[in-house]
Image (cartoon, rainbow, N blue to C red):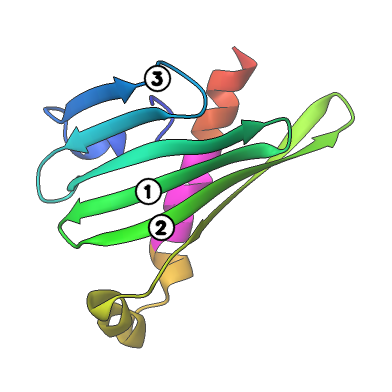
Amino acid sequence: MPWSPWEKLDPNMKREYMAAPQGVGAKYGWSGNGKAGEGTMEILEANTNGVKIDLRFVRPFKNQCITHFHFTPQGSATNVRWTMDGPNMFMGKVMGMFMNMDKLIGKDFENGLAGLKRVAEH
């Protein structure tokens, strides 16, 4: 995923593609340094309205989230909205007491969407 802002965190990150090569059931795993962490993503739904992904983090913190890319046609373009929903585990609650999570990862989402736009337009 060359558009992902997290791909650049570890140039030696190990990546594995599993199960289906694309669409529902496609699965991607990564394992990298402390910044990149480890986890998997599996496509649960994919249609003209968007893509729903089961995102599981193994380290640095275990957690499971559902990530959506929502597609809304706008003339000859498509607006993409990226959301992530999941339980706020202990470390997330502690971090949330001292940091604004939207500010903490919001810039990553903006960079990722900009990178996705560049890839889609080529």
Location of residue 81 with respect to 116 vertically, above or below: below
C-alpha distance separating marks 1 and 3: 16 Å
C-alpha distance separating marks 2 and 3: 21 Å
What residue would you read off at disc 1?
A: 55
Seen in the image, is 62 located left or right of residue 101? left
Find residue 6 and report its image quarter: top left
Give amino acid for label 2: Cys
The answer to whether the residue labelled 2 contacts the one labelled 3, judged by CB atoms less than 8 Å apart, is no
Q: Nearer the viewer, residue 49 or 8?
A: 49
> Which residue is rendered at x = 73% and y = 30% of the image?
48
Q: Residues within 10 Å of mark 3 (few under 14, many from 20)?
A: few
Give amino acid for label 1: Leu
- Badge 1 or badge 2: first in the primary sequence: 1
Regarding mark 3 in the picture, which secondary structure is present there? loop
Q: Nearer the viewer, residue 120 or 55?
A: 55
> Which residue is rendered at x = 42% and y = 50% of the image?
108
> Which residue is rendered at x = 31% and y = 82% of the image?
93
| Numbered mark located on residue 65 in the image | 2
Range shown magenta: 105-113
The answer to whether the residue labelled 1 contacts the one labelled 2, judged by CB atoms less than 8 Å apart, is yes
C-alpha distance separating marks 1 and 2: 5 Å
Give amino acid for label 3: Ala
Counting every numbered tag in the picture gives 3
Estimate the x, y position of residue 111 in percent, counting from the top left: 47, 42
Estimate the x, y position of residue 83 in percent, counting from the top left: 55, 55
Q: Main secondary structure of the magenta part?
A: helix
Location of residue 89 with respect to 47 vertically, above or below: below
- Badge 1 or badge 3: first in the primary sequence: 3
Does 75 appear in magenta? no
Does 110 appear in magenta? yes
